[in-house]
Image (cartoon, rainbow, N blue to C red):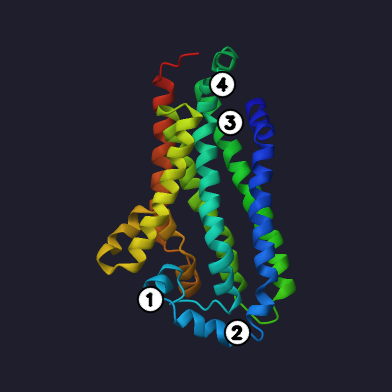
Amino acid sequence: MVIYKREIFRNRKSTMLWTSILLSYNVCMLLLYPSMVGPLKDSMNVMIQSFPKEMIAAFGLDKVSMTEMLGFYNTYCYLLVTILGGIFAVIQGSSILSKEEDEKTIEFLLSKPVSRNNIITSKIFAVLTNLVILNTIISVISFVTIELVNKESYNRRVLLLLFIAPIFMQITFAAIGLIISIFIVKARINFPTGVGIVLGCYFISIIATISSKADFLKYFTPFKYVDGADIITKQAIEPIYLIIMAIVTLTCVIATYIIYNKKDIVA
């Protein structure tokens, strides 16, 4: 519990900074929604139809309408929440263990009467807490803003799925970051590595979306597992994607416990 509280305290500024950035962006974009369904609605639809079909597919505009609330949220808010949320998650995961070695504090930590398993467990729960804090604040305030600006009916259950889905993806990226931190302890290396993985997965999802020949790539990127347009049209998250994320997460976490307990840690 002491380690858990220490990690929450150490990461409080980072968590609130990322939360503030995403929240401010979401609220600002949602406040623009009334103008999208007002006099600009028809012109917006015409403009969208003039986009290249690859661009329309990449943003899911072939499945949802940007002039309806759920489609608007998916296009302008959800996409950034998944990208920046994924980066935040992988940074949290990749730094939570490695920073002790990078900052030369691991000797002090291991001198305490706690096992390595206890250290890993406490730090994992700290990461999960930070992810829950970020998503809860963003979801609650975004929902309140939507209720204030939207005058038409929409499926609140689907909106709830759009609030929940990023958490599953972020946990997956955090677990990937966790296993990275076992092998790469220098922040100047593991941060760019983690961010590169997230952005790489995003571009893979775009390729899988716009090219029928590359459709198989959708199984290799968490961004397709929680694709907003698919969630809106199907009103559900595909069970196979939930299973894949669970397998990846559990595999990375279990491997972290095994490898970290056997690792020779140099203070």
For the residue carrying disc 1, how many other residues have a C-alpha within 10 Å: few (<14), some (14-19), or many (20+)?
Answer: few
| Residue type indicated by callout 2 | Lys
For the residue carrying disc 3, how many other residues have a C-alpha within 10 Å: few (<14), some (14-19), or many (20+)?
Answer: some
Q: Specify which label sits upstream in the sequence, 4 or 3.
A: 4
21 relative to 90, above or below:
below
- The answer to whether the residues at label 1 and label 3 have Cβ atoms under 8 Å apart is no
Residue, disc 2: 41
Residue shown at 59%/63% (left/top)? 77
C-alpha distance separating marks 2 and 3: 50 Å
- The answer to whether the residues at label 4 and label 3 have Cβ atoms under 8 Å apart is no
Q: Secondary structure at mark 4?
A: loop
Residue shown at 70%/81% (left/top)? 151
229 relative to 99, above or below:
below
Residue, disc 1: 53
Residue shown at 47%/27% (left/top)? 186
C-alpha distance separating marks 2 and 4: 54 Å
Q: Specify which label sits upstream in the sequence, 1 or 3.
A: 1
User: Where on the picture, by quarter, is residue 1?
Assistant: top right
Residue, disc 3: 122
Mark 2 vs mark 4: give the one in front. 2
User: Can residue 240 be seen in the rendering of this structure?
Assistant: no
Residue, disc 4: 103
Give the image location of residue 113, x and y in percent: 59, 14
| Residue type indicated by callout 3 | Ser
C-alpha distance separating marks 1 and 3: 47 Å
